[in-house]
Image (cartoon, rainbow, N blue to C red):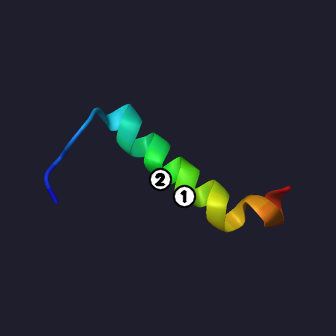
Amino acid sequence: MTPQGTESEQIADVYTLDLQVFGDDRG
C-alpha cells in the first residue's frame, strides 16, 4: 500500500472503521 493523504486522514479512516465495528457496543 502506498502512503496517501496525511496522518490525520489515515487516523480518520481507522477511527471511522472502528466506529463501524464497535459503534453499537459503545453506544
Q: Is residue 10 left or right of residue 19?
A: left
Q: What is the C-alpha distance between the residues marked 2 and 1? A: 5 Å
Q: Is residue 12 left or right of residue 27?
A: left
Could you tell me the amino acid type at mark 1? Leu
Residue pictured at 21% horizontal, 42% vertical: 4
Q: Is residue 12 left or right of residue 10?
A: right
Whether the residues at callouts 2 and 1 have beta carbons within 8 Å, the answer is: yes
Which residue position holds label 2?
14
Secondary structure of residue under mark 1: helix
Image coords of residue 16 (percent x, y): 56, 50
* Classed neighbour count for the residue bearing mark 1: other residues with Cα under 10 Å, few (<14), some (14–19), many (≥20): few
Which residue position holds label 1?
17
* Classed neighbour count for the residue bearing mark 2: other residues with Cα under 10 Å, few (<14), some (14–19), many (≥20): few
Residue pictured at 80% horizontal, 63% vertical: 24
Could you tell me the amino acid type at mark 2? Val
Image coords of residue 3 (percent x, y): 18, 46
Image coords of residue 2 (percent x, y): 13, 52
Q: Quadrant of residue 1?
A: bottom left
Please give the count of numbered marks on the rendered protein: 2
Image coords of residue 15 (percent x, y): 54, 49
